[in-house]
Image (tube, rainbow, N blue to C red):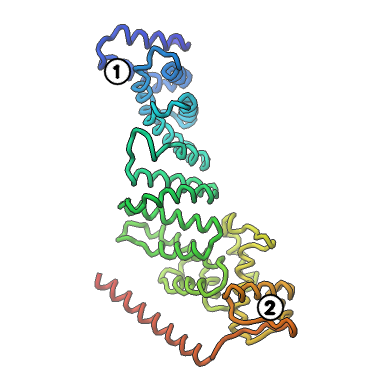
Amino acid sequence: MASSSSSIVQTLNAIVTETSDANARMEKFTELVGTLVGNHDIPRLKELADCMLAEQTQFALFARPILQQVTEKMEQLRNSELKELGLHILDQLRGRVVSFEEEDFVIRELLANVFQAEGEWSEAAKCLAAINLEAGSRCRTPQQKAEKYVQIAQYYLEDDDAVSADTFCTRAAMVMHEVQDVPLNLRFRVCHARILDSKRRFLDAASKYCDLSQQALGGQVDEGDLLKLLQCAVTCAILAPAGPQRSKILALLCKDDRIRSVDHYEILLKMFMERLIRSSEIQKFEESLLPHQKASLPDGQTVLERAVLQHNVLAASRVYKNMKLPDLGLLLGVPADRAERIAAKMVSEQRLTGYICQRTGIIHFDVGNETLLTWDKHNRNLCSEVDSVLMKVKETTT
């Protein structure tokens, strides 16, 4: 086979003129494409695509079947070759996708796999995002749409692009109610939890992860994956703002039989027991955080620093009825005025019960009637034990 573009034209002309039968022509075209792909002859494959997609071409009737043959055999190429040829064909298809919708779809899926293998997550996502799933000649089922939208969102999350991931997760949400596939539904929910995590909405993310970590689905989900979700729930719970909502999630996590096998259980337990946490105790935990979890807030402190400071204020309120603000600052390891701001914000958001007397510089923690608190505590413990017994009875009966 000659290497020039004209020789490709001559070969195609020879097939058309020498073979009158349509089936015989397709066999010749298939043989030509198979030879070029088998020889990994990317320049000639590009020339073949150019010849088929030229504006003024005598092979317009054969363009689609020949390109279909090319796309079907492209996966036999090496990743670098597939990438070169695929990008070239997509460039030629620009503005003409309607006529070659299926070929465009197949090439983009193959290219996305190549970008994924190279760790180019955003490029993989953009490649799939360009597929028009809502319109076109081919009618796609809700499951096919959801599958692609979730996959795109997952790719964006790998590049820590929560905004773009949220866009496609929202699109998936619009059709998920029509999807019966259990693993796909689970992937969607995990994706949503990761988006909340990436947006630093740690309280919501912890709740989602906690719920997902208990979805065994009759053995359909690997136990190792469930433990990873439980680990994510622990991390987000530790990073979440201190308050009643976080306390509920901490209680749920501490009731889980697997929790002792999860990393950083000691910190989680201290937070649940409302004990003071020193900065030296969280160093190992800080090293395990993802980049978005280490991000600095507008006031200059990290998410972890904020979470620990707020937790220690809450822990102090369980030990002291009142404190001078300088003493609270000393306990937290920050200046008195910063300790006051932290406590005031927690009080205003109803995450801490108490008040600050500006005149005396004392914070008063309102712990309520101790008798009632003790009674409530006993009731909570009793309800927790009853719930645990009922869960075990349910497991044995099923």
> What quarter of the picture does the C terminus occupy?
bottom left
- Residue most toward the bottom? 371
Q: Secondary structure at mark 2?
A: helix
The CA distance from mark 1 to mark 2 is 82 Å
Question: Contact, CB < 8 Å: mark 1 with mark 2?
Answer: no
Q: Residue 159 appears at what percent x and percent y?
A: 54, 47
Q: Position of residue 136 (x, y in %)?
A: 37, 34
In the rendered image, the vertical position of residue 31 relative to residue 375, given as above or below: above
- Residue 155 rendering spot, x and y as whole percentages: 48, 45
The residue lying at 32 percent from left, 56 percent from top is 220
In the rendered view, would you say 351 is above or below 203?
below
In terms of secondary structure, where does tag 1 sit? helix
Q: Is residue 294 left or right of residue 208?
A: right
Q: Residues within 10 Å of mark 2 (few under 14, many from 20)?
A: some
Q: Give the amino acid type for the residue marked by disc 1 in the picture.
A: Met
**In the picture, residue 278 is in which quadrant?**
bottom right
Quadrant where the N terminus sits is top left
- Residue to which mark 1 is pinned: 26
Q: Which residue is mark 2?
A: 331
The residue at the point 55 percent across, 88 percent down is: 368
State the image quarter where residue 106 is shown. top left
Q: What's the residue type where badge 2 is placed? A: Leu
Provide residue 20's location: percent of width, then percent of height. Answer: 26, 9
| Image height of 171 relative to 311, above or below | above
Q: How many marks?
A: 2
**Nearest the eye: 43 or 108:** 108
Res 355 → quadrant: bottom right
Marks 1 and 2, the one that precedes in the sequence:
1
Residue at image coords 42%, 29%? 97
Instruction: Name the residue at 39% across, 50% down.
Output: 174
Nearer-the-camera pick, 138 or 235: 138
Extreme residue in the front direction:
135
